[in-house]
């Protein structure tokens, strides 16, 4: 009996070693997919380019006004399914409050994070701490932080790396200063900032690049749409040279700089645009209209039914924006559009039924 027990124990130990070896091998294979080593790119299975509308609430508002704003957001009709994301970035002191009040189909992000890990860095907030709070996103490299606080390209790149390593999604802002713009160095400045990030970051599937020129930050007018499209094209070409092709097809490029309900449709109608970063206009229900514009125009074709659904959402946003002015006329438009959508859906259902019966 003793010898039999020893043989059984030896057999179990051998099986355990084999299982451990298989687990180690599987771990190594998984690690190889994400390790940033030469000749190997991170795995991009299951990734696709989404549409993004981000509300940068800046250093604005009290707790009371933030609460009222979140209530307006929660009442809004914004399609967040089908690879569309809405991100709200409140002031750091309001993060916990917004996390507890904001609708679940909107994500919450922070306006900054530390480039350091845990340690003696008073006043800093680490990316890991943000993730543990329930924050999903963080924004870095805003023009005002570069200009007013002196954050250089290296600092922004280190923050991006810290955030992606912690598992957060990052809106990495790049854009020329006013001096660089006047010197005709817009493209060179943007690509220099991207070079700093690519040298520090390897999880690009978690990065959204936001073109945010300083000249349009806080101004009353965005720069020309054609110029935005040109810079976005330069960024996409840079990605084609620096990143794996699978990642290039999935990294989003958005625009931020004096985006309003007046210019959002013009900005988002081009195929190079994957969303919008909204500043001052996000401080009221105008953001709902802008978010719907970002959801509609993403450089991808929509089905007719989905376009009708989005049109309805836009009309609802218009009603919220007008705050009751001429509301009856807008409601009538909503009703007529809903009837049209219902007719279309019924036709699709009849076609599907007839196709199934013929088979």
Image (spheres, rainbow, N blue to C red):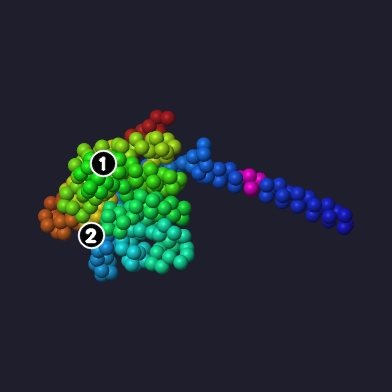
Instruction: Give the quarter of the figure containing the C terminus.
Output: top left
Along the viewing direction, whichever of 276 and 320 lies nearer the viewer: 276
Q: Residue 191: percent from the left, percent from the top?
A: 33, 41
Local packing at callout 2 (Cα closer than 10 Å; few below 14, some 14-19, many 20+) is some
Q: Nearer the viewer, mark 1 or mark 2?
A: 1
Q: Residue at 38% across / 32% down in the picture? A: 355
Q: Badge 1 is on which residue?
A: 185
Instruction: Evaluate if marks 1 and 2 touch, with contact meaning CB atoms under 8 Å apart.
Output: no
Question: How far from the left and from the top, in percent, is residue 327?
Answer: 14, 55
Per the image, label 1 sits on a secondary structure element best described as loop
Q: Which one is nearer the viewer's eye here, 165 or 124? A: 124
Q: In the rendered structure, does residue 275 fall within the stretch colored magenta? A: no
* Label whose residue precedes the other's in the sequence (1 or 2): 1
Q: Residue at x 88, y 55 (%)?
A: 3
Indicate the position of residue 331 as horizontal and vertical percent values.
Answer: 17, 52
Q: Is 73 or 65 nearer to us in this picture? A: 65
- What's drawn in magenta, residue-wise? 22-26
133, above or below 233, in the image: below
* Residue 265 image position (x, y, % from top left): 21, 44
Q: CA distance from mark 1 to mark 2?
A: 32 Å
* Residue 347 seen in this snapshot: no
Give the main secondary structure, helix, strand or loop, of the magenta stretch.
helix
Residue furthest to the left in view is: 326
Task: Give the secondary structure at mark 2.
Answer: helix
Total residue callouts = 2
> Quadrant location of residue 66?
bottom left
Left or right: where 27 falls relative to 238:
right
Q: In the image, which disc is placed on residue 283?
A: 2
User: Tag 1: Cα neighbours inside 10 Å, few (<14), some, or many (≥20)?
Assistant: some
Q: Is residue 146 visible?
A: yes
């Amino acid at each position: 009996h003793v010898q039999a027990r020893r043989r059984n124990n030896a057999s179990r130990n051998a099986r355990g070693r084999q299982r451990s070896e298989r687990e180690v091998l599987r771990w190594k294979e998984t690690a190889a997919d994400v390790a940033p080593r030469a000749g190997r790119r991170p795995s991009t299975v299951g990734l696709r380019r989404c549409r993004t509308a981000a509300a940068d609430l800046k250093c604005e508002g009290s707790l009371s006004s933030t609460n009222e704003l979140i209530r307006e957001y929660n009442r809004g009709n914004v399609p967040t399914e089908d690879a569309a994301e809405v991100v709200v970035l409140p002031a750091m002191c309001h993060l916990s409050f917004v996390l507890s009040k904001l609708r679940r189909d909107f994500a919450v992000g922070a306006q900054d994070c530390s480039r350091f890990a845990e340690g003696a860095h008073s006043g800093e907030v680490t990316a890991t701490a943000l993730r543990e709070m329930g924050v999903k996103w963080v924004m870095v490299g805003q023009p005002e932080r570069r200009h007013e606080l002196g954050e250089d390209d290296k600092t922004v790149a280190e923050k991006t790396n810290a955030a992606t390593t912690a598992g957060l999604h990052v809106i990495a802002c790049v854009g020329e200063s006013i001096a660089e713009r006047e010197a005709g160095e817009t493209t060179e400045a943007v690509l220099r900032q991207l070079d700093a990030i690519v040298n520090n970051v390897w999880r690009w599937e978690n990065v959204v690049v936001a073109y945010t020129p300083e000249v349009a930050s806080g101004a009353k007018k965005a720069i020309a749409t054609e110029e935005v499209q040109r810079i976005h094209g330069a960024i996409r070409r840079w990605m084609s040279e620096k990143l794996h092709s699978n990642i290039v097809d999935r990294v989003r490029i958005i625009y931020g700089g004096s985006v309003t309900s007046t210019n959002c449709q013009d900005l988002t109608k081009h195929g190079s645009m994957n969303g919008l970063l909204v500043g001052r206009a996000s401080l009221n229900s105008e953001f709902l209209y802008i978010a719907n514009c970002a959801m509609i125009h993403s450089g991808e074709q929509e089905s007719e039914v989905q376009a009708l659904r989005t049109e309805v959402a836009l009309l609802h946003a218009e009603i919220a924006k007008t705050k009751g002015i001429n509301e009856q006329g807008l409601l009538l438009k909503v009703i007529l559009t809903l009837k049209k959508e219902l007719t279309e859906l019924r036709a699709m259902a009849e076609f599907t039924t007839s196709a199934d019966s013929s088979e």
